[in-house]
Amino acid sequence: MTIPMDLAAPDASIVIVGAGLAGVRVAESLRDNGFEGRVLLLSDEPHEPYDRPPLSKDVLLDPEREHTISLATATDLAARGIELRLGAQVVQIDRAAKSVTLVSGEALPYTRLILATGSRARRFALAPEPHDAVHYMRTLDDARRLRSWLDGKATLAVVGGGVIGLEAASVASRLGKAVTVIEAGQRVMARSVAPVVSRILEQMHVAAGVKFRFGATISEIRSAGDTLEIELGDGRAVQADALLIGIGASPNIEIAEAAGLKTEQGGIVTDAYGRTSDPAIFAAGEVALYAGASGLERQETWAHAEAHGSFVGRAVLGDDRLYDVMPTYWSDQYDTSLQVAGRPVGEEDVLRGDPASGRFIVFHLVGGAIVGVSSAGMPREMRQAKALISARKCVAPVLLADPAFDLKSA
Ligand SMILES: Cc1cc2nc3c(=O)[nH]c(=O)nc-3n(C[C@H](O)[C@H](O)[C@H](O)COP(=O)(O)OP(=O)(O)OC[C@H]3O[C@@H](n4cnc5c(N)ncnc54)[C@H](O)[C@@H]3O)c2cc1C
């Protein structure tokens, strides 16, 4: 790998906007791969870089867990020559001058700019705002706010039966709250799991006392004293002391758009190496809509932010290997850690194991080949299934469903 000449110059400077997982991994990767110039990591948050997945899980359950979520301290980063600036929101990119402007008015020049701005929680227009009882879940401050608001409260309503809504529902239910999930579709996590897995998850929540309102539209949310009254389209109403809106995330693309960079489908468009429509600017992590094997792709997972951040760091320095990482994610609900790899839904989805025991694996097949797998409590089978996905193996469904059939033999 030959580092581009302008990046080998003594005054070269790489500015990274966003100090989430992807931004931190870009910075580390630049150092790991021999960049010796200035690395500036800018965050609009007041906290040192932290991991988001625990926010809707352990951190919501127990404030002590906040101590376990650090991604890197300012001291760790400084030791590697990475300058972390907190509360440093970038409000403008000047592509002609190759500089970014902070909200304070300060301008910072760059040789390369990396946009790792991630996403924010999508707002729900009907939710009264600001309102103490209305919550979102994207940042450490969001998790702290919901945790302290739930203290001493009896009921939580969740709008959206997606990953974050269900994880928060499982924590709240563990804390003894009565939880109702309001979902517009007919099943939970419809975007990210197969119907058979939706049913398994739903049953787990129902067993814990969570109530579901499927196919529900919300016509109005009223403040009624200390509680909220959520009126549904069918005339029924849900009363709640707290309301969590979990209806997805909106990528932070505004500064890229304003600078005239190409954006599409809500993401910043890049080539296979993370380079945007301006060759001096790259995008990494959740905000990037990158050229993948099957067209433009954007992923909202921890594993992608981690791998893509490291990848873009290398690509900026001239590494021409392609990004080739199998999509994976997990979700923790109650005592179940659901692991998903590859495509989460097939033309046919084959179940092995007993979901009631917490140990199951679902193979997702397209044209007979295994393209994805969803599993809990079966790490060995999960590992073997991932190898079968990589090999695009066809295995008869009847064998996949049979616990006696050794996947290794396939
Ligand atoms: C509550 C929660 C639970 C999750 N659980 C899981 C899970 O169980 N499994 C899984 O696989 N994935 C999970 N994820 C998804 C995963 O955490 C994200 O995909 C990943 O964090 C994305 O990383 P990122 O660095 O691309 O973006 P982000 O983490 O969003 O970081 C972007 C950073 O950039 C900052 N920023 C934005 N604009 C600017 C600007 N103009 N100037 C300066 N800074 C800016 C943002 O404030 C933010 O700090 C979860 C996400 C959340 C929110």
Image: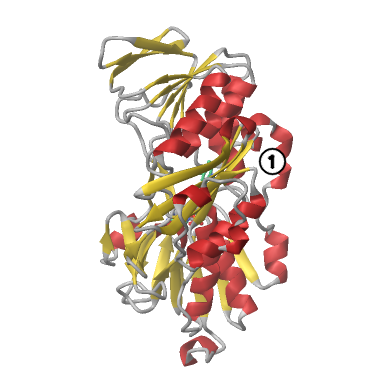
Can residue 96 be seen in the rendering of this structure? yes
**Image location (x, y in percent) of residue 278:** 32, 75
Residue at mark 1: C-beta within 8 A of ligand 1 = no
Please, what secondary structure does the residue beneath circle 1 have? helix
Q: Amino acid at mark 1?
A: Glu
The front one of 34 and 170 is 170
Where is 267 relative to 149, above or below? below
Scheme by which the image is coloured: secondary structure
Q: Is residue 11 left or right of residue 120?
A: right
Instruction: Return the x and y of residue 305 as percentages of the image width and height.
Output: 51, 59
Q: Is residue 102 left or right of residue 377?
A: left
Is residue 117 visible in the rendered image? The answer is no
Vertical placement of residue 345 versus 386, above or below? above
Q: Position of residue 148 (x, y in %)?
A: 61, 24
Closest to the observer: 346 or 55?
A: 346
Nearer-the-camera pick, 393 or 245: 393
Q: On the image, which quarter does residue 213 sit in? A: top left
The structure residue drawn at horizontal position 54% and vertical position 89%, both measured from the top left corner, is: 1
Rendered position, 212 above or below 277: above
Mark 1 Cα within 10 Å, few/some/many (few <14, many 20+)? Answer: some
Residue 83, image quadrant? bottom right
Q: Nearer the viewer, residue 288 or 348?
A: 348
State the quadrant of the C terminus: bottom right
x, y percent for residue 228: 41, 13
Residue carrying label 1: 66
Residue at 44% x, 7% y is: 225
Residue 281, quarter of the rendered image:
bottom left
